[in-house]
């Protein structure tokens, strides 16, 4: 493009016309680029929400108690002697 005689500002403008604003380093905020600007924050918030829900569910889980049979089965043997 430089060989064609285009200036520095003309090159990104032509890329933007052909490929859209997604190729720009700092695309403008408009409806077609909203996901670029706000998508990472939405995904971060969603990840934090899932982590909080998972941690709270684990905290409320009741510990499992062993039945009498299982308790006797896993009890250490008395020392011989």
Image: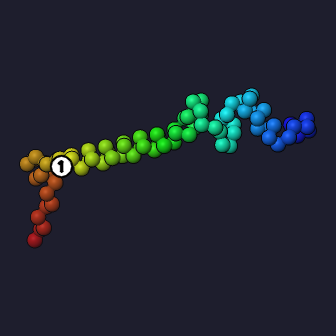
Q: Position of residue 46 (x, y in %)?
A: 41, 40
Which residue is located at x 80 percent, y 41 percent? 9
Q: Is residue 32 left or right of residue 75?
A: right
Q: Position of residue 22 (x, y in %)?
A: 65, 35
Q: Circle 1 sits on which residue? A: 63
Q: Quadrant of the C terminus?
A: bottom left
**Count of number-bearing discs:** 1
* Quadrant in the rendering for residue 4: top right
The 10 Å Cα crowd at callout 1, few under 14, some 14 to 19, many 20 or more, is few
Q: Position of residue 55 (x, y in %)?
A: 30, 48
Q: Quadrant of the N terminus?
A: top right
- In this rendering, the answer to whether 80 lies above or below 18 is below
* Quadrant in the rendering for residue 12: top right
Q: Position of residue 2 (x, y in %)?
A: 88, 40
Which residue is located at x 52 percent, y 39 percent? 38
Q: Secondary structure at mark 1?
A: loop
In the image, farthest residue toward the bottom: 81
How are the colours assigned in the image? rainbow
In the image, farthest residue toward the left: 68
Q: Nearer the viewer, residue 38 or 61?
A: 38
Which residue is located at x 42 percent, y 43 percent? 45
Q: Is residue 26 left or right of residue 68?
A: right
- In this rendering, the answer to whether 19 lies above or below 59 is above
- In this rendering, the answer to whether 69 lies above or below 15 is below
């Amino acid at each position: 493009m430089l060989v064609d005689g285009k200036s520095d500002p003309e090159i990104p403008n032509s890329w933007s016309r052909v490929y859209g604003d997604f190729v720009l380093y700092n695309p403008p905020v408009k409806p077609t680029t909203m996901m670029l600007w706000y998508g990472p924050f939405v995904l971060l918030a969603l990840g934090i929400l899932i982590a909080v829900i998972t941690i709270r569910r684990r905290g409320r889980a009741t510990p499992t108690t062993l039945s009498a049979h299982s308790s006797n089965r896993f009890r250490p043997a008395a020392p011989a002697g």
